[in-house]
Amino acid sequence: MRSEKVFDGRLIKLFKSYIRLPDGRKGYFEEIRHPGAALVVPFTGDCVVFIRQYRPVIGKYIWELPAGTLNPGETPYSCAKREVTEETGYAVSDLKRIGTIYSSPGFCDEVIHIFRADCIARGTHNRDTDEFLSVRRIRTKNVKSLFQNKRISDSKTIAALAFAGLLG
């Protein structure tokens, strides 16, 4: 019905919105609009390539899978391939979409497209200047125990591992 932009940042935009609800009433919502992202579960043989990345907002390093925001006009597929190489240095030989999630649909429209990739020879990464991370290959048979031991707390990574059949 009506939205007012409150903040226009580099990554997100914040709106105060009045939206017509299914029963006809008008509801007030604060919503974040996000361009979307791609996340990849990269495999090399019997291992999954993880990153341990410093997240300034929470002030600590966490285990994640390679992911990134879509650039204007970029497809999720292209973003996924780009992010694997940028963050890990691995080249993607095969890439398949395995799922889609909404990160926080109560207040944000971000859609994360999840892919499974087979990767080959590790080369040079091309990380952003604000990315502090290390790369580690973890055997697929050990991924579930890493999660069960509460070593993985990133929700998009957990969802992607479930789509890839590694938590079942």
Image (cartoon, helix red, strand yellow):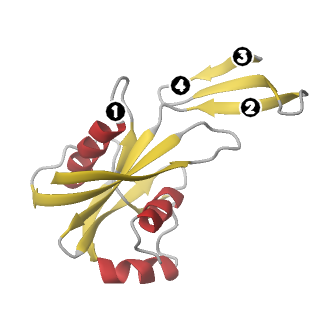
Q: Where 122 falls versus 110 (above or below)?
A: below
Q: Where 46 falls versus 130 (above or below)?
A: below
Q: Nearer the viewer, residue 107 or 167?
A: 167
Residue assigned mark 3: 4
Q: Are marks 4 and 2 in contact (CB under 8 Å)?
A: no
Query: Distance between the Cα atoms at labels 4 and 3?
Result: 14 Å
Residue at the image point whose x is 77% and y is 17% from the top: 1
Rendered image: mark on residue 9: 4
Query: Distance between the Cα atoms at labels 2 and 1?
Result: 27 Å
Mark 2 or mark 4, which is nearer the start of the sequence? Answer: 4
Rendered image: mark on residue 13: none
Q: Nearer the viewer, residue 68 or 59?
A: 68
Mark 3 or mark 1, which is nearer the start of the sequence? Answer: 3
Q: Are marks 4 and 1 in contact (CB under 8 Å)?
A: no
Q: Are marks 2 and 3 in contact (CB under 8 Å)?
A: no
Q: In terms of secondary structure, where does tag 2 sit?
A: strand
For marks 4 and 3, give the one nearer the viewer: 3
Residue at the image point whose x is 44% and y is 63% from the top: 163
> What percent of the width, then of the height, locates residue 141?
33, 83
Could you tell me if residue 39 is visible in this image? Answer: yes
Rendered image: mark on residue 75: 1
Q: Are marks 4 and 3 in contact (CB under 8 Å)?
A: no
Residue assigned mark 2: 30
Q: In terms of secondary structure, where does tag 4 sit?
A: loop
For marks 4 and 1, give the one nearer the viewer: 1
Q: Label 2 amino acid? A: Glu
Left or right relative to 1: residue 6: left
Q: In terms of secondary structure, where does tag 1 sit?
A: loop
Q: Label 4 amino acid? A: Gly
Could you tell me if residue 89 is visible in this image? Answer: no
Q: Label 3 amino acid? A: Glu
Query: Distance between the Cα atoms at labels 4 and 2?
Result: 15 Å
